[in-house]
Amino acid sequence: MKFMKLGSRPDTFYTAQAVRSVSSEVSSDLIVQVKGSRYLLHKFPLLSKCLRLQRLCSESPETSQHHIVQLPDFPGGVEAFELCAKFCYGITITLSAFNIVAVRCAAEYLQMTEDVEKGNLTYKLEVFFNSCILHGWKDSIVTLQSTKEFPSWSEDLGITSRCIEAIASKVLTHPSKVSLSHIYSRRERDDESCNGAESQRHKPLSKGWWAEDMAELGIDLYWRTMIAVKSGGKMPSSLMGEALKIYAARWLPNISRERNVNKQVASDSDSDSTNEITSKHRVLLESIVSLLPAEKGAVSCSFLLKLLKAANILNASSSSKMELARRVALQMEEATVRDLLIPSISYANSTVYDVDLVITILEQFMLQGQSPPTSPPRSKLGFERRRSRSAENIVLAFQESRRSSSASHSSKLKVAKLVDGYLQEIARDINLPLSKFIALAEAIPDFSRLDHDDLYRAIDIYLKAHPDLNKSERKRLCRTLDCKKLSVEACMHAAQNELLPLRVVVQVLFFEQARAAMGSGKVTELPSNIKALLAAHNIDPSRPTTTLSTTTSIPADDQWSVSGLRSPKSKVSTLRMKLAEDDLDESDLQSEGLRRTSKFKSFCALPTRPKRMFSKFLSINRNSSEKN
């Protein structure tokens, strides 16, 4: 780093009885008091260079042999005053980026300008600042950091603005053309080779070399500097996003819901300091949100959701949270279930996670107007052999739109898997209202769920965690479930699930047995009533069933138990138990192609195997149809 030495005389200042003096054959005639410290000095060297001291001495009465001057609001403290006093005496002083701001403010306060004496301290400091400090990277960063001690003075003297402009210009310049002042970051000092022969500064620098050093700035200065960098218009949004991620990791704490709980039980003395820290973190977070690049993908979805978690806990402004939710929705397919587990700060309903915020994100995602790819109109395909350039452009544009639509469709498929996995996590919360669970489940379009195994698993977990649901609530919960999209394992589990509504179990058994009958080859053609039922549900009985989804991990206690499910008695016993506790609705049975309740009750009461029962049932219906 750059430094400058002024003066040639040795240091003769000393302390005697808590008073700072300078060794001289001439007795002192000036007493200067600076923030509790007293200096015994001489008028001639100081007044010849300090216009303010001249005026103060002329205004203050002379007592005995000394003039007493008090400087209570002196900027920079006793260290800066002593450096200015030593300069007046010609004693050697060393100036660098660490103390130039304090000395510059002190010299301005004392009015050590060219009007008083040529080559005064103010002039020398300005030359050093403009020619050396602003030309070095590390010097500019350190100088800008030191301005926070004297914000108003630094602003008035233009130190802050000039440092910001210098830093922004270096960020936008190729690293090879930047003077890094021997070191530019902590990594350089730590990444030397074992023999010390090669250091990081001799290696090519990456495009984001500046982000780590700038992360040392306070949020106010960092925000202004990043705005200056963005206004340059040359910085890629991905680098801006990476810099913000580094800064957030440097300053934002690892916030958790427990920390908010601890804050509530803290004492009154600790509460004020805690609130002050929380307020600083909130301002920092909102500033980071305002700096996020507008381009999609500039920052990862995981980083955005981490910011949203912090914003929720720190009680950030609603505008900041909505902006984060909107940005998350643009790239929601990149998220994971863990990312969406945003802690709730509402202790009224005591829910573990903030489901409303996830619903808002999902609504924003669905409002993007994405749709699955469709076939082009026939008019666009009926081109002649010799097509014009404009016609080719139309085809290329259409193909591009199809590719983007296809990507949007695939993102909805990923989001559907994501939401079903999220439902499995929040379903364990005993305080989660049924309405919120259903709202999340129904927010996903039907075409986005290729199978309903994950959704069924979430419903099963919710039913276990909420055993007090009545019959109508269980029906509402299972309304989104499509039984024909369940795999074999899911059907086997649902067939003996005592928590499901009876209508769902009947549908599962019917679809499974109908497809099994056609798949085994023992029945060549289904009766007309069953065909009509399958057609009403868009089922192809010859189509193989889907496999069990393995994209979502399940805790051991929530794994489906399929032991004994292959035994036919288990399905019959499940139906028998449900019929004993609940009367079957005739309208439900008619929708499944069964005309009379009594016939179905007697059918379920038979202690024979389901496959044989269905075969007999199918043959009876076939004979009756042939006679007719």
Image: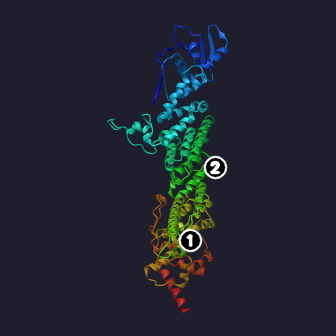
Q: Secondary structure at mark 1?
A: helix
| Mark identifier at residue 318 | 2
From the top left corner, tell me how far across and down residue 4 is, in percent. 47, 25
Q: Name the residue type under label 2.
A: Ser
Residue ID at (51%, 56%): 337
How was the colour assigned to the protein in this rendering?
rainbow
Upstream in the sequence, badge 2 or badge 1?
2
Q: Name the residue type under label 1.
A: Val
Answer with the quarter of the image where residue 106 lies: top right
- Is 596 rendered above or below residue 228? below
From the top left corner, tell me how far across and down residue 288 is, in percent. 56, 45
Find the distance from the CA under tag 2 to the CA under tag 1.
Answer: 42 Å
Count every numbered label the image shows and give the total: 2
From the top left corner, tell me how far across and down residue 32 is, in percent. 60, 16
- Is 20 rendered above or below residue 297? above
Can residue 609 be seen in this snapshot? no
Answer with the quarter of the image where residue 379 lies: bottom right
Q: Locate the N terminus and report the quarter of the image it occupies.
A: top left
Near mark 2 (Cα within 10 A), the count class, few <14, some 14-19 or many ≥20, is few
Residue positioned most to the left = 195
